[in-house]
Image: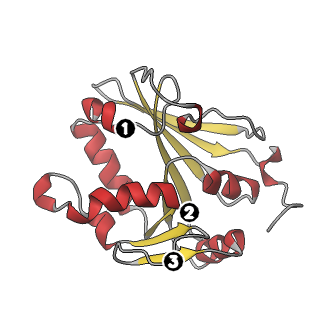
Amino acid sequence: MGKIVNATYLTLDGDISNMQDWHMDYFGEEANRAADAQQRAADAVIMGRETYESFAEVWPSVTEEDGSPARLNLMKKYVVSTTLTEPKWQNTEVISEHVAERIRELKESGTNLLQYGFGQVTRLMLDHGLLDEVRFWLHPVLSGKAAPGELLYRDGQQYKFGFNGVEVHETGLLILSYTPSTGSNAFDTTNAS
């Protein structure tokens, strides 16, 4: 059985969308090692279209010489989208229907999946009991500019988590690890698609 890990980078005020403005100020050696280990533990990446398109703009040009692990370029990428038909980033497969079932198949085949960001795909996995761990990379900054759609905090179903631990970096960055609680409403699959 594979494992699905979500990695969400955010600020103290919940901004998950404007990383270009705050992320690199706190991304030191410790964070680089943690990000590399996180990628190396995964066989593939799963994401929604918005995250995919933002990554596809940058990552294809990243090389080991840039000081960042280029492993993401070589990994299989699964994109959940009903509108993306011709992905340009190498090793990309679009999942456009029976999404929960397809993700479950990948997990049951032993594929370890890494997901960046927190949105509809994450909530779908929580709803279907597919997500194994959430890692919140909490940056010690108030973004002050995120629009409502760019925040982690949104109206919706309540999800409960068990605390696994925290990694504290010299830059003030915290990596908080949680496991979705089995007793929460997150595993109600009566509305499974």
Furthest residue in direction left, as rendered: 65
Residue 92 to residue 71: above or below: below
Q: Quadrant of residue 101?
A: bottom right
Q: Crowdedness of circle 3 by 10 Å Cα count: few (<14), some, many (20+)?
A: few
Q: Residue at x 89, y 61 (%)?
A: 190
Give the amino acid type for the residue marked by disc 3 in the picture. Thr
In the picture, measured across the screen, residue 76 lies left or right of residue 150, that is left
Q: Nearer the viewer, mark 3 or mark 2?
A: 3
Residue position marked by numbered label 3 in the rendering: 85
**Viewer-side residue, 149 vs 71:** 149
Q: Position of residue 2 (x, y in %)?
A: 56, 69
CA separation in Å, label 1 and label 3: 27 Å
Give the residue pinned by disc 2: 3
Local secondary structure at mark 2: loop
Which mark sits nearer the N-terminus, 1 or 2?
2
The picture places residue 8, in percent across and down from the top left corner, at 49, 43
Q: Are marks 3 and 2 in contact (CB under 8 Å)?
A: no
Along the viewing direction, whichever of 132 and 67 lies nearer the viewer: 67
The residue under label 2 is which amino acid type?
Lys
